[in-house]
Image (tube, grey):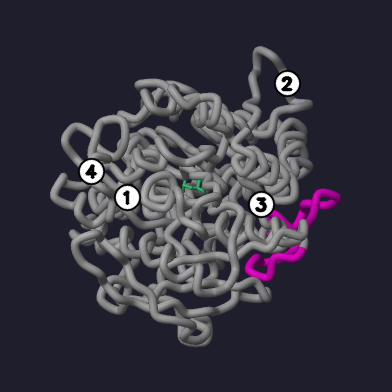
Amino acid sequence: MTPLLSTGGLAEVAAALPRALRAQGHDVRVAMPCYRQITTPHRGEHYCLCEADYGDRVVHGALRLATVPDTDMPLYLVEHEGYFGREAPYGTGAYEYNDNAERFCFFCLALFHAIPQTGWKPDIVHCNDWHTALIPAHLKTRYQGDSYWGDVASIFTIHNLAYQGRYDASSYGCTGLAPEFFHPDALEYEGDLNLMKGALVFADKLNTVSPRYAREIQTIEYGAGLHGILSARHGDLHGILNGVDYDVWNPATDSHIATNYDASDISGKRICKQALQKLFGLPAASVPLFGVVSRLHWQKGMDLLASALDDIMRRDLQLVVLGTGDPGIETQLRAAMARFPDKLGLYLGFDAPRAHTVQAGSDFLLMPSRYEPCGLGQLYAMAYGTVPLVRRTGGLADTVCGYSTLRQNGDEATGLSFVPLTNQALTRCMQDALTLYEKRDLLQQLRMNGMNQRYSWERSSREYETLYALAINRG
Ligand code: GLC
């Protein structure tokens, strides 16, 4: 949860959605592991001891009570030095910690023991991604007749179906579940333990972060092996788009960018472009500038971009890339930068001020994702009058209306899009962007269309409210 710790879009959702629900009068409380990266002032105070009952053994930890930064919303931090006092939340480099099953089972089990001690009881637990997936399974099994937990509902949100918490069967002992749930209709998957599958089976309601991705994951192509259970539960599976925190992402007030601007006058964007070129060591040329703010990962189509670089860099454009990830892709990018130092700017790392600088200063934002549950970058781009160039999939397809020369839909288009996952399709779409750059009026229109979009958390949180009500009433 930003600003405590972030590895991607989920951290922004985790910060924004509880606030939006709270603003509607709900009593929301957030729970997360007490990672080492959370600084002392944010850790609050020791509240109580707690334990995780794995069935054959008990592991002790503690619950700390803090507040979500800049709010008075309670934040419960599950503390266990051995599990969470590490260099990184999930693992280092390309490797995840080999006891992640145990670490996150501990987190879930400890909450069952700790939360009742706070004297507060939720109507519903909203679980996000596989790390929390054991909670719905326990609510429907071990805690079904429990005097405290027995009537608590659950909803499980999929932010990324590729990460399922799949481990060797020997890890099943950490779940604290009875042996009979290691079964193909519960947590077993091809002989392995699959924690996310448990949530897909047992949560009262399921959702993902765009309507289109909710449909896609019911197919073999996008279902990552879980399309069967997802399509079996299609009546309970919803798609709710993420929102944008416009307090953070607003070019009129953004303190990270060279100058502020808004839809009534976007001339400041030119100054922001020059600042971006300077920051990335590129000449102040008036050529189209493409930005990338992304994990450098297969999911994001970054391998595709890397392998198309030779072709791309021959054209009259500039490209800046901000992100980290796959070492192979990083190497390819570094090599390309050495060859095209005036055209390719690279920052292999991540920080928020740079991300804002790229969003404000780019003409186009590239998101050639293989799959994209929602995607936030394209929403930020539109808010900054930067035209997103996306692969038409998942949340990208739901939020970006691609310009088509055939349909001449300049009045509604907010970006450019392509479908086939090929270098040719990507470079052709980038060529369309170069053409668009020359047609200043049309470019201006697309920018304005984007800036006039509104993806408020208010709206998204209302949809969650409706879904929570369905889950609570088992509707
Ligand atoms: C994951 C998805 C991304 C989504 C984010 C927040 O990072 O890959 O598409 O926007 O979660 O839901």
Q: CA distance from mark 1 to mark 3?
A: 30 Å
Q: CA distance from mark 4 to mark 3?
A: 35 Å
N-term-proximal mark, 2 vs 4: 4
Which residue is disc 2 drawn over?
Answer: 409
Which residue is disc 4 drawn over?
Answer: 193
Q: Identify residue type, mark 3.
A: Val
Q: Is residue 182 magenta?
A: no
Q: Looking at the rendered structure, which numbered label has been put on residue 333?
A: 1
Q: Looking at the rendered structure, which numbered label has been put on residue 244?
A: 3
Give the structural element (helix, strand or loop) at label 1. Answer: helix
The residue carrying mark 2 has its beta carbon less than 8 Å from ligand 1: no
Residue 457 versus residue 247 in the image, above or below: above
Magenta-highlighted residues:
253-271
Asked if labels 1 and 4 touch by Cβ distance under 8 angstroms, the answer is no
The chief SS type of the magenta part is: loop
Q: CA distance from mark 4 to mark 1?
A: 37 Å
Residue 110 versus residue 24 in the image, above or below: below
N-term-proximal mark, 2 vs 1: 1
Please report the residue visible at 38 percent of the width from the left and 60 percent of the height from the top: 108
Which is more toward the observer, 181 or 376? 181
Residue 458 versus residue 434 in the image, above or below: below
Q: Quadrant of the C terminus?
A: top right
Comparing labels 2 and 4, the label whose residue is closer to the camera: 4
Comparing labels 4 and 1, the label whose residue is closer to the camera: 4
Residue 249: give x, y in percent of width and height.
67, 58
Q: Is residue 26 visible?
A: yes
Q: Is residue 262 magenta?
A: yes
Q: Identify residue type, mark 4.
A: Leu
The residue carrying mark 4 has its beta carbon less than 8 Å from ligand 1: no
Which is more toward the observer, 153 or 127? 153
